[in-house]
Image: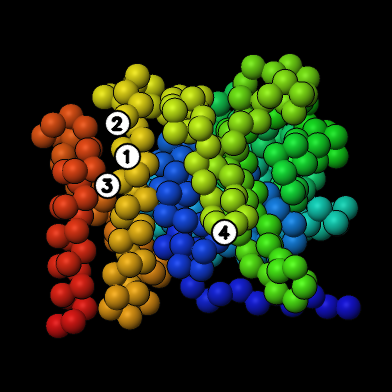
Amino acid sequence: AYAIRRHREEPWTLPLFIKNKMINPFAAGLMSFLIDGSRTILVAGTRSSGKTSLLGSLMLEIIPRYRIIVLEDTLELPVESLRNLKYDILRMKVRSALLKSSTEISADDGIRTSLRLGDSCLIVGEVRSEEAKALYEAMRVGALANVVAGTIHGASPYGVFDRVVNDLGVPATSFKATDIIMVCNPIKTPDGLHSWRRVLQIAEIRKHWQKDPQEEKGFVDLMKYHVEKDELEPSDDLINGDSEIIKDIASNVKGWAGNWDAVYDNILLRAKIKEEIVSVSNKLGNLNLLEAPFNVRSNDSFHKISDKIIQEIGLPLSERVFPDWQKWLNQEIKKTRI
C-alpha cells in the first residue's frame, strides 16, 4: 500500500488559519508572542489534524535573522519556501525511526550535531523515538537558547506526557522542559459526514510538580476550545495574569517585568494585526495578503515599528504601534495596485 500526502504548495500562515477558523486572532497573537519569547513548544494531535501545517506557520513567526535547523525523516515542513523568503534555514534529513540502519544519521545524533552549530532555533518534524531523550537533554541544560518546537501524536497535554515519558523513555522531571502544548484535532458534525480542523487547547506546563502533572495541576490552560462558539477562548489564568510561562518571558524584557497590562496589551496588539490582515484581505479580495511573503514583511514591519516606539517611550504600546503599522499596510496595498 502507498500513502500519498498532498501538501499546500505555499506554507500555511497564521492569517490563513484565522480565515479558515482553525484559530482565532487572539490565539494567533498568543502564538506569535510565545515564539518571540523563545519557548519550547510541542504541537500535538492525531493524524491529519494539521500539526505539521501549524508548526510551519509558527516557523514564519521566527525573526529571519535567527538560524533555524530543521530535523525531519519525512520531508514535510516548508523549508525551501522559507529559504526563498531569505530565512537562514538548514534542513537535516535523518533516518526514519522505522529503520534500524541506513546511510542517514539517526534523529538523536542529528539533534546532538545541531547543538554544535551554535545559537539556533530547532524544529523537529515529529518527536517519535530515541531522539526525544537527546532533545530533552539539550533543553534541560539550556543548550538551545532559542525556539524549540516539534510535533507529536497525542490528544491532550497528559496524552503527550504519557507518550514522552512512558513510550519514549524521557524522565518525568525532564518533561518540565516543555513550556507549551498546542492540541489540534478535527471537529466532526453529529452525522459524522463533515469535519473541520481546529486548535482545541493551548496549555502551559508548570514546573512545581514532582511525579504526575495531571494530579499535581501541572497543566494549566491558556486557551480552550468552546464548541458552541466554535473558537478558542482565553482562560481566567491568562486573562488575570497567572501564566507562569508568559510572566517568565516578561521578566527578561525591560518594561514588562511585573507589568501584566503591558504584556497583555502586546498579545492583543499582535492579535489585532493578524485580524486586520484577514479583514483587509476579505475586503479587497486580495488573497496574497494571507500568504507567507506578505506575512514575513508584515512581521518585519511590526518589529521595526515596535523597536522605534520602544526607543521613544520605552514600551511598544498598541496605541502607538498599531496606527504606524496600519500606515505601512496601506502603503503596501497601494504599491500592489500601481
- Tell whether label 1 touches label 2 (CB within 8 Å): yes
Where is residue 321? Give x, y as percent.
Answer: 20, 46
- The residue tagged with tag 4: helix, strand or loop? loop
Question: 183 or 6: which is nearer to us?
Answer: 183
> Of the numbered discs in the image, which one, if any, rests on residue 262?
2
Q: CA distance from mark 2 to mark 1?
A: 6 Å
In the foreground, 144 or 26: 26
Task: Identify the residue under disc 1.
Answer: 266
* Residue ranking furthest to the bottom: 338
Label annotation for residue 319: none
Q: Position of residue 258 (x, y in %)?
A: 35, 19
Q: Position of residue 12 (x, y in %)?
A: 50, 66
To which quarter of the image does residue 116 belong? top right
* Amino acid residing under circle 2: Ala
- The image's mark for residue 303 is 3
Q: Earlier in the sequence, mark 4 or mark 3?
A: 4
Tag 4–tag 2 contact (CB < 8 Å): no
Going by the numbered disc 4, the residue's amino acid type is Asp
- Report the residue marked by disc 4: 230
